[in-house]
Amino acid sequence: MSRLGTETAFQVLARAQALEAKGKDIVHLEIGEPDFDTPQNIRDAATAALDEGCTHYCNSQGIVPLRAEIAKEMERTRGVPVDPDRVIVTPGAKPIMFYSILALLDKGDEAIYPDPLYPIYESMINFSGAKAVPVRLREELDFRFDVDELRSKVTPHTKLIILNSPHNPTGGVLEEEDIRTVAEIAQKYNITVLSDEVYEHIIYEGKPFSIASLPGMLDRTILLNGFSKTYAMTGWRLGYAVMPPQLLEPVVRLITNSVSCTAPFIQHAGIEALTGPQDSIPRMVSELKKRRDLIVDGLNQIPGISCLRPKGAFYVFPNVKELGMDCNQFADYLMNETGVAVLPGTHFGSYGEGYLRLSYATSAENIKKALGRIAAAVTDIRKKSVQ
């Protein structure tokens, strides 16, 4: 258990709520959760499924109608035929990381992951007993990795490479040439790729590109996705993966041993999400883009802070190194003194030092309020440093 980390956003949320309980006004920029409601047609589908008695155990792998729709969605968006038997449904996308890493890695193995990173990757690699090998995402490359540096990390013990694009926490998006390079490495050295694509629809420039669409990669890619971000279904806990054949049976066995199955009425809501109206997605992305521009422009007007304009997801990862305060201290200062809850970059790996992660999945009013408070905090900090 000592090797198992956590997702610190929930810890910061708890601290922020404790301050709120004491009467402090807090602007929440720490939790990565859309502030939009789940579309009504999806909620209606869940209600109908409940009324029809979809409240019993079901196939651990997921109900066939949902797996069939996911397979169609994968073929439509990735251009490769997918057998529904290769689809696994889980309560949230996070279990896919958990099960895949447990099934694939053991002591002596190595897994390469991006840093800064979604913290559960490193946590689960360490929990499995394998060695976690970070490859740095570089601000000067728009938070992409250097492909030569990635190649240098590969050893005979490398069993897994993790991709996440669009990326949490930076909002960076890998270019097609980056993904093709990873595919080339994976095929040359017989490495499995875990491609986390949960933000695939929340992209502001260009189109997402999936490694699973490349020749020969579907059989060595764990394609991770879910409904939480695209359809504002975070609390529903509904995720899925398209698995390489050799991992299907072990992962289904892990599901049976842990959660038995995913709630069937929620799976019926997932069918409606995929087959029903899709107009909520462009509306949400359009609004998020406005918020992105608002927060990026505002942060770049604050002396000592610089912020790239992310191409996807709903996070910014501003550089605060010029403030002369480590990112944990600055995040604590913002929370305690000004009432803005953010996450220090080091919560996302060692290469996150000097950065903060802010989620702009909140109202424009909240973003403006947060920007004003952050600017005031920077002014106070600089005055104190001069004194």
Image: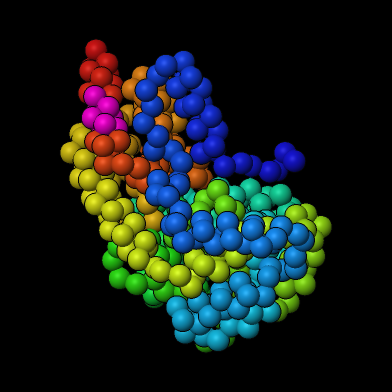
Residue 111: in sight, yes or no?
no
Q: Is residue 374 magenta?
A: yes
Q: Is residue 356 above or below residue 229?
A: above
- Tell me the quadrant of the picture where the N terminus can be found: top right
Q: Main secondary structure of the magenta part?
A: helix
Residue 88, image quadrant = bottom right
Residue 261 in the image: above or below residue 176: above
Q: Work out whether residue 299 or residue 350 is closer to the camera in this orientation and state it.
A: 299
Q: Position of residue 113 (x, y in %)?
A: 55, 58
Question: From the viewer's perspective, is residue 214 above or below residue 368?
Answer: below
State the image quarter where residue 178 is shown: bottom left
Seen at 55% across and 33% down, the residue is 11
Q: Position of residue 286 (x, y in %)?
A: 28, 58
- Identify which residue is drawn at 65% across, 65% down: 89
Q: Is residue 170 found left or right of 267 in the rendered image?
A: left
Looking at this rendering, what residue extends furthest in the left direction? 301
Q: Residue at x 39, y 56 (%)?
A: 313
Q: Residue furthest top?
A: 387
Along the line of sight, which residue is nearer the eye, 61 or 54?
54
What x and y, as percent, mark residue 108? 74, 59
User: Residue visible at 55% across and 86% down?
Assistant: 81
Q: Quadrant of the C terminus?
A: top left
Can you give x and y, in whole percent of width and height, for residue 321 in the image?
A: 33, 37
Looking at the image, residue 264 sits to the left or right of residue 228; the answer is: right
Along the horizontal axis of the image, is 359 left or right of 130? left
Q: Is residue 25 magenta?
A: no
- Residue 287 visible in the shown view: yes
State which quadrant residue 26 falls in.
Answer: top left
What's drawn in magenta, residue-wise?
A: 369-376
